[in-house]
Image (spheres, rainbow, N blue to C red):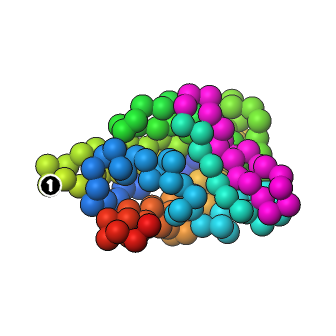
Amino acid sequence: MTTEVQTSHTPVRKSVTVKAPAERAFRIFTEGIDTWWPRSHHIGKALMRKTVIEGRVGGRCYSEQVDDTECDWGSILVWDPPRRLVIAWQISPNWQYEPELAKSSEVEVWFTPEPDGTTRVDLEHHHFERYGPGADTMRTAVDDPEGWSGLLRHFAARVAQQDAGND
């Protein structure tokens, strides 16, 4: 008998440690997302001008496009600065906006202060099974080196740049 492993039920987990207090790391991750999120990572129909996270439960996550349109890509489910953030990842496996939360995965991010003054940022992207047949496609995409690993590298570089006084 062959056992098939359903990877769609396995969360994607990534971590990075940044040289910043949790408050600053959280602020750069959320309020400062536009300073580190790559312009290539969006689902809008036109080129992305800016990405925004509205800092409150129920807040939108969206991009502003160069053609003056906006494209939602998520919403805030948990807002607990500077400790935790949960975003409904409202992007379908076809890279389109998914308005139904029941069909969206979630991205949970924890900011843990370390004794040496750094902050460990742990990210878990889960609930891929909500996508149905496209679950493995989305999981594979966000687990790709240019998925969450690459995004956290961009984030860490921005924290380091700001730490060096280069805003």
Residue sitting at the far left: 115
- Front residue of this view, candidates 142 and 74: 74
Is residue 67 found inside the magenta-colored segment of the image? yes
Position of 51 relative to 80 (above/below): below
- Front residue of this view, candidates 143 and 79: 79
At label 1, counting other C-alpha atoms closer than 10 Å, the crowd grade (few under 14, some 14-19, many 20 or more) is few
Q: Residue drawn at (78%, 49%), measured in percent from left and top?
A: 70
Is residue 48 found inside the magenta-colored segment of the image? no
> Regarding mark 1 in the picture, which secondary structure is present there?
loop
- Front residue of this view, candidates 67 and 97: 67
Apparent side of residue 2 relative to residue 130 in the rendered image (left or right): left
Q: Residue drawn at (19%, 53%), measured in percent from left and top?
A: 117
Tell me the residue that label 1 is attached to: 116
Position of 167 relative to 138 (above/below): below
Tell me the quarter of the picture where residue 9 sits: top right
Apparent side of residue 158 relative to residue 60 in the rendered image (left or right): left
Q: Position of residue 53 (x, y in %)?
A: 59, 44
Amino acid at dot 1: Asp
Quarter occupied by the C terminus = bottom left
| Highlighted magenta segment, given as a residue range | 56-74
Q: Position of residue 81 (x, y in %)?
A: 40, 35
Apparent side of residue 111 relative to residue 49 in the rendered image (left or right): left
Q: Position of residue 50 (x, y in %)?
A: 67, 58
Q: Residue drawn at (46%, 51%), measured in percent from left and top?
A: 29
Position of 166 relative to 63 (above/below): below
Apparent side of residue 143 relative to residue 94 in the rendered image (left or right): left
Q: Position of residue 134 (x, y in %)?
A: 72, 49
Q: Residue drawn at (50%, 30%), measured in percent from left and top?
A: 78
Q: Is residue 87 visible?
A: yes
